Image (cartoon, grey):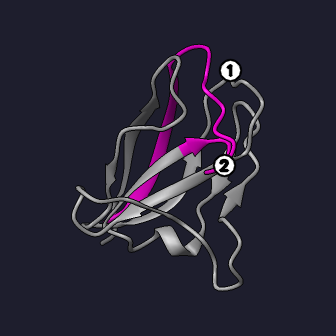
Amino acid sequence: MAQAQIVPLTIPAGESLSDSLDVTAGEASYVLTPGEWDPANVTFQISFDNVTFWDLFDEYGREVMLACEPGVGVLMHSGLQSTGYFKIRSGTRDNPVPQSEDRNFKVVFWS
């Protein structure tokens, strides 16, 4: 039987990129956003080895982006469900948005 796991993921104050999250043992379903957030969409970096990360783009050449509103649940992009590892970025590759305080996400995935 599948079981939900809630895993914290933080973008540190003054930074725009989170630490990495290991999803090799499950499928990321949605993310719970922090209650406070300096306005920005979120984008992602992915990795198969947790060493080298690449910016995530879709098949049309667009950076995968999700709207980020404070204190909501957001469905994860299907491309993140079996990537191995991923990071959340505040802003885009070309325009990262450093957060003024630690921003603590909660990623819900199934294993």
Q: Quadrant of residue 101?
A: top right
Residue 111 located left or right of residue 57: left
| Residue type of the residue flagged with mark 2 | Asp
Image vertical order of residue 61 relative to residue 102, above or below: below
Image vertical order of residue 14 relative to residue 19, above or below: above
Q: Where is residue 10 in the image (x, y as percent from the top left)?
A: 44, 31
Image vertical order of residue 31 relative to residue 11, above or below: below
Q: Where is residue 108 in the image (x, y as percent from the top left)?
A: 46, 51
Q: Position of residue 12 (x, y in %)?
A: 45, 23
| 28 part of magenta stretch | no
Q: Which mark is residue 36?
A: 1
Q: How crowded is mark 2: few (under 14 residues within 10 Å), some or many (20 or more)?
A: few
Q: Residue 94 carries which label?
A: 2
Residue 67 located left or right of residue 42: right
Work out which quarter of the rendered image holds the C terminus and state it. Answer: bottom left
Element type at marker 1? loop
Image vertical order of residue 75 relative to residue 32, above or below: below
| Residue type of the residue flagged with mark 1 | Glu
Q: In which quarter of the image is residue 51?
A: bottom left
Residue located at (69% from left, 25% from top): 37
Residue range corresponding to the magenta coloring: 89-111
